[in-house]
Amino acid sequence: IRPHSSPLYGGASFHDGISFNAETQRVVLKAVGAAPTITTLTSAFTFTGDSSSMFMGPAGLLVQQVTNTPRIEYDASGNCLGLLMEGSRTNLALHSNDHTNVAWVKTTMTTAKTSTGPDGVTNSATRLTATAGNALSLQTVVSASATRAYSVWMRRITGTGNIDMTLDNGVGWTTRTLTSSWQRFEITQAAVTNPVFGIRIVTSGDAIDVYGNQMESAAFASSLMPTTTTTVGRIADSCTRVLSSEFSATAGTVIVTGRASGGQDATNGNHVFEFNNATSANRMRFFRLLGTDSSEFRVTDTSATQTTGLLGTFQNSTNYKAAMAYAANDFAFSFNGAAVATDAAGTIPAITTLGLGMSSVASDA
């Protein structure tokens, strides 16, 4: 959920309903004819999450997640990206920041944990220096065949030669273009058993800094979960509100700006929001369908789908805007300013709860 501009905070007028601005972390709740309540996200919603992950803070540095505290993420320039909501994941890579550890097998490579990482902490990152051509630092994970995503933060220190990544023991190498600034790089591959992953410095004498190695059984990388001697898992984030008089059960409009996930998920639909009654039988939601780039505004009443054709297309890790409206026999949807799609037949389900960035009742198809 990304920040948006509206008259809520710049003028005297307030819209009926619920409005959330990620940059200010303020929520406005207003029933028809009532005075607005201006509060915080954690006061208006129940949020749960653990402390295993890191995310980019307003100073352009990685910061550690705090238990049961929403993550408002920024880019490296300090621009607010919005509320970060993620599903459960596990980092299988050990000693994610420390290539000096024996978990990383080095070939003609020297390592020193003496560099300041993208978290701004002294000696949190590792300097890798090639003492011969095609120097390696690799780690092996014993894990059944699965789609893999390997991600790592890197920056160049000296040299101009290729810097390559692998997750299949060098059967394939992917060259990445490094600069003197920290950047996160990612490669993915299907059906990898016992992944052997890491970095190759092609030219002798070249040196780079590395931080935050992460190996996931997934189609795209999620936020960093630092590890030492054991793997680290993250529980799924949850952000829900039991609705009150600020919600109209008969007609309404939802406008949202956001940033699409980094890839397709064949297991869980990426939900932007969902209204439900704590069951999968009654829902109104906007989500990314399983294993596709398609987005849909879908309404379900008493387990029967009420809407069809209210579709858009996500682009991975790209900003979007969407608007949708609901009333009995009158549904509408527009994605990124495209022509409005409508559905003139359908009923409205009984709704009690709103979830942001997740579904509390189903993974969705």
Image: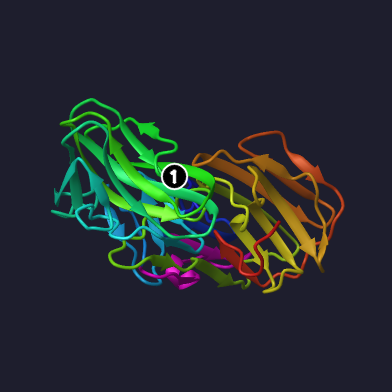
In the picture provided, is 248 more to the left or to the right than 160?
A: right
Mark 1 sits on what residue? 168
Is residue 293 placed above or below 267 in the rendered structure? above
Counting other residues with Cα less than 10 Å from the Cα at mark 1, is it few (<14), some (14-19), or many (20 or more)? some
Magenta region includes residue 40: yes
Q: Amino acid at mark 1?
A: Asp
Q: Is residue 351 left or right of residue 150?
A: right
Quarter residue 340 falls in: top right
Q: Where is residue 310 drawn, in percent x and y? A: 74, 45
Who is closer to the viewer here, 94 or 243? 94
Taking 271 as reference, is 302 above or below it? Answer: below
Determine whether, in the image, residue 192 is placed left or right of residue 284: left
Please indicate, yes or no, whether residue 78 appears anywhere in the rendered image: no
Q: How many marks?
A: 1
Where residue 24 sits, quadrant-wise, is bottom left
* Residue sitting at x 42%, y 66%: 233
- Kindly give the residue lying farthest to the right in the view shown: 345
| Res 201 visible | yes
Residue name at image x 44 percent, y 38 percent: 171
Side (left or right) of 363 relative to 135: right
Q: Residue at x 41, y 48 (%)?
A: 150
| Nearer-the-camera pick, 71 or 148 | 148
Residue located 85% across and 56% down the image? 346
Q: Position of residue 140 (x, y in %)?
A: 37, 54
Element marked by disc 1: loop
Residue situated in front as seen by the camera: 27 or 54: 54
Report x, y in % for residue 114: 12, 50
Q: Quadrant of the C terminus?
A: bottom right
- Looking at the rendering, the stretch of residues picked out in magenta corresponds to 26-51
